[in-house]
Amino acid sequence: MIIWIASYPKSGNTWVRSFLSSYIYKNAKSFNFSDLEKIRAFPSDLEINFLRKKYGKYKFTHMAEHWDIFQKNIINKNKYTFLKTHNALVNIKNFSFTNLNNTLGLIYIIRDPRDVAISYSSHLNLNLKDTINHMQNINLTEKTPDNLDRTLITSWSNHYNSWNLLPKKKIVIRYEDLIDKPGSSFLKILQYLNQIIPIHVDKKLITQTIELVNFNKLKLLESENGFIENKSPKKNHKFFKEGKKKQWVVNLPRNLQDKIKKMFEKEMFENKYIV
């Protein structure tokens, strides 16, 4: 069954995947971006290429019709597997993105939407105002390089709320806590996983893994080797750019801060981004 690592784009998903890839599959001995293949994206190019061969320029409804088929094929090969996604937990024409038969658990990473706006703006090569409008768009999709629909992201609030309603044992982790308290935050993730799969929780190993995949080392890896998952349309854009919190205090104009707060007030309050 699937343990989802879900998040809105630019919210720390890759950092969590990097940690789990090294901790679980490499025993904290090393880390390279190729290790992320142990926790691949869904849908990946495998699913995209299948749909291309079957339909040519497929429609998103074709993707939705195959979600369950694709996931069952993945599950058949594994007792449990981790999958990363930016897709919201949506239902398209009675086809759900996932279901309780396919899903074992969920790690959801959330980030202050004011910082998401700054990072996503750079990633998309859009100005902040247009990026924030994207984050409000319930029909927002992530595209392939040839402009086919890959995932249905929806708005920032819809994305969070959709996964938060999943009736399975889950954990919600704030990106900001990964920065401020990486040891206790990753410990919480592993303690959660230990409730649903057999996994060894070792605090010393956690510390070693955090050092292996800290943001500066990921940034250096990208600088030296590139990062194949960097899908930004912006030339020479770096996926691992800042990795900081509260960039919005300096870099987001007050009127846009207020706009985000008004749009997402309930969810921001719920996750202690505002009081």
Image: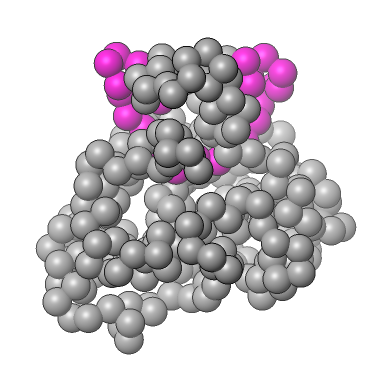
The residue stretch that appears in magenta: 73-102
* Quarter of the image where one finds residue 213: bottom right
Front residue of 106/193: it is 106
Tell me if 231 is positioned left or right of 250 in this view: right
* Quarter of the image where one finds residue 123: bottom left
Q: Residue at x 79, y 44 (%)?
A: 25
Seen in the picture, residue 182 relative to 36 is either above or below; the reply is below
Tell me if 235 is positioned left or right of 200 in this view: left
| Residue 205 visible to an observer of this rendering | yes
Seen in the picture, residue 66 relative to 261 is either above or below; the reply is above
Image quarter where the C terminus lies is bottom left
Tell me if 142 is positioned left or right of 237 in this view: left
Tell me if 194 is positioned left or right of 204 in this view: left
Q: Residue at x 22, y 47 (%)?
A: 137
Is 95 part of what is drawn in magenta?
yes
Q: Position of residue 84 (x, y in %)?
A: 55, 41
| Residue 188 visible to an observer of this rendering | no
Is 255 part of what is drawn in magenta?
no
* Quarter of the image where one finds residue 59: top left
Q: Position of residue 266 (x, y in %)?
A: 18, 55
Q: Position of residue 171 (x, y in %)?
A: 47, 46
Image quarter where the N terminus lies is top right
Front residue of 114/132: it is 132
Number of marks drawn: 0
Q: Residue at x 26, y 53 (%)?
A: 134
The chosen color scheme is one colour
Q: Residue at x 71, y 34 (%)?
A: 198
Of all residues shown, which one is farthest toward the bottom?
Answer: 250
Seen in the picture, residue 81 relative to 253 is either above or below; the reply is above
Front residue of 201/17: it is 17
